[in-house]
Image (cartoon, rainbow, N blue to C red):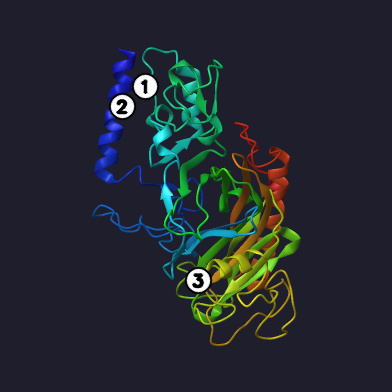
Amino acid sequence: MYYFKLLFISLCALSFSNLFGQGNYEYLDINNQRIPLQNDGRAFLRLTGLPEGSKGFEESQIPKGSNRSTIFSQDLWLGALLSDSSIKVSGELTYSKIELGKRKAGISDSERNTSSKKAVWKIYRQEIIKHRKQYKDPEYIMHESILNWPAKKSTDIVNEDELAPFQDMNNNGYYDPENGDFPLIRGEQAVFTIFHYDDPNNSNALNGVQVNLMLYGFINRGTILDDIIFANYKIINKNKEDFLDFRLGNLNNYSLGQGVVRQIASDSTTNSFFAYNQKFLSPNNGVDQTPVYGVRSLSNTLDYSFSLRRITNSPIGIPQTKEDFWNYLNGRFKDSTTIADHYQSHESNKFMYPVGKNWTIPGYSLEFNVGIHNLGALPAGESTCIDMAYILASNTQKSTPKTIEKFRKMAAGVKTIYDYDYSGCYDTDEFWFVGNEEYS
């Protein structure tokens, strides 16, 4: 009877997946941000092809319920220096339809894996707790997210660490939740997907790289975690060749504010880069608060941060070639000059623009903000990882300086919480300290 129940719930889950498009995307929506994640790892991006009647649920909502967002899309740049001194890059700018290398859903060696799906999994900590307590109960019906968690199954011939993390309660080397195994997640709600880069017809592209991405968050409790979501990237070099120098870029395309009132900034003291609305109120905000939105690097040092112009024929414009991407990934503009203020002071700075300066550029809309991380060498068959926090700061007093200062305090506070609970981005401890009133 127990196994018939498992079969029934699996078939139901499959039916609803086909009917509503579930599986190709899911939302992280446990707190004040609502973020879509697609099965090729694209987050924040507006979803297309959803069922009729789903208006308002096709894109990120920041703050949740406002029917507005502060960010249009988030793109990933990956670059590597190989042993023959050649460079390979895979990256994109979704807004400008620029793509070097192809991002694809699923595990890169799909023929080696019989159970991994090209999907997104959404799971709650409460479901895991219930499973751990009741999996032996003959009346227990296992939740689909636990039953189909993309961990290593008995029929898979991939390495365990290539798939989703799980607790192997009976130490048999594979995921069998009917015997008590359970998913290892972070936060109280998580969405997880696996994607890879594969463009065999492009000799410039960095192929054979797999990324396991988990977005997660916590229930609102009146702390700074109400306005923060987290991203954990595990990156696997599945090539036969070592990466002597491996770099990651995180590009955010912001939509808060309007035109020239949108400003870009960096704060090296908190390892963060962000955008803010220069004016107290802008029609695009959708809420009567001044938003600041940005990224805090938690596990790694932020090496560079800068903004791009929405044109191609400029040394600080959109990258088009692998040399353009690689220059940016090494803290240089497209013309190989060091990062600097090209408009006002012209001074070189690893962080464009540092907190405390006037960054107004009349006539230009600053939308693209990039953070660069040097992740060091990545040998063949090995993995590296990085943790980030996406922070929303708003201020009911409608003061931009106060909101920026609030963002900086939140960035400092979330790092303290992160360091308290995790020994690094590989840590999948099932429990997380869920808040600290001191930073609320």
How far from the left and from the top, in percent, is residue 401?
Answer: 67, 72
Label 1 belongs to which residue?
141
Splitting the image into 4 quarters, where does residue 424 fall? top right
Mark 3 surroundings within 10 Å by alpha-carbon count, few (fewer than 14), some (14 through 19), many (20 or more)? some
* Observer able to see residue 290: no
Q: CA distance from mark 1 to mark 2?
A: 8 Å
Q: Are marks 1 and 2 in contact (CB under 8 Å)?
A: yes
Q: Secondary structure at mark 3?
A: loop
Q: From this view, report whether residue 105 is shown above or below residue 286.
A: above
Q: Residue at x 65, y 59 (%)?
A: 85
Amino acid type, residue under disc 2 in the picture = Ile
How far from the left and from the top, in percent, is residue 377?
Answer: 68, 49
Q: Judge depth for marks 3 and 2 and give the one in front.
A: 3
Q: Secondary structure at mark 2?
A: helix
How far from the left and from the top, in percent, is residue 400?
Answer: 63, 72
Label 3 belongs to which residue?
320
Q: Secondary structure at mark 1?
A: loop
Q: Judge depth for marks 3 and 1 and give the one in front.
A: 3
Q: Earlier in the sequence, mark 3 or mark 2?
A: 2
How far from the left and from the top, in percent, is residue 203?
Answer: 49, 59
Label 2 belongs to which residue?
9
Q: From this view, report whether residue 165 is shown above or below residue 208.
A: above
